[in-house]
Image (cartoon, rainbow, N blue to C red):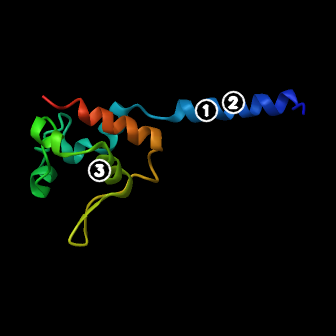
Amino acid sequence: MKYPTTLLLALAFAASAAIASAATASDNWDNNCTKCHGADGKGLTKIGKKLNLKDYTDAAVQAKMTDEEMTKAITDGVSDNGKEKMKSFKDDLSAAEIKDLVAYVRKFKA
């Protein structure tokens, strides 16, 4: 089956636009995470201290977290006793962006 050139060009343009619109892990961290977790991942912001957030630079903290747990937290959010502690990012970030963000958090480990 032959496809018209215009259809193929439109599909290629749509695919490249989707790739171009994906933010880097660093940008996603800066835009979505630093308010609570801090730019350095230590969680020493006003909100981070209030929520008693983990220090992602601590190797022991990182060792206790699996990539799957981080992915679930970013995707579905985190609740504690029915109260939202972290919002869900499933509507804001693609699966690839979430995976890249998990890898970005791993780089904080001292």
- Locate residue 71 relative to residue 79 in the image: left or right: right
Percent coordinates x, y for residue 104 in the rendering:
30, 33
Q: In this view, does 104 lie above or below 44?
A: above
Label 3 secondary element: helix
Q: What residue type is labelled 3?
A: Glu
Q: Where is residue 92 in the image (x, y as percent from the top left)?
A: 44, 49
Which of the labelled discs sits on residue 69, or is there none?
3
Q: Is mark 1 on a helix, strand or loop?
A: helix
Relative to 9, does residue 35 appear above or below in the rendering?
A: below
Q: Which amino acid does label 2 sit on?
A: Phe
Position of 8 with respect to 59 (left or right) is right
- The type of residue carrying mark 1 is Ala
Classify 10 Å Cα crowding around label 2: few (below 14), some (14-19), many (20 and above): few
Which residue is identified by label 1?
17
The total of numbered circles placed on residues is: 3
Q: Mark 1 or mark 3: which comes first in sequence?
A: 1
Q: Can residue 15 be seen in this view?
A: yes
Marks 1 and 2 in Cβ contact (< 8 Å): yes
Q: Are marks 2 and 3 in contact (CB under 8 Å)?
A: no
Residue at left 49%, top 35%? Answer: 22
User: Residue at image x 67%, y 35%?
Assistant: 14
Q: What residue appears at the point 19 percent right and 31 percent down from the top-left corner?
A: 108
**Residue pointed to by mark 2:** 13
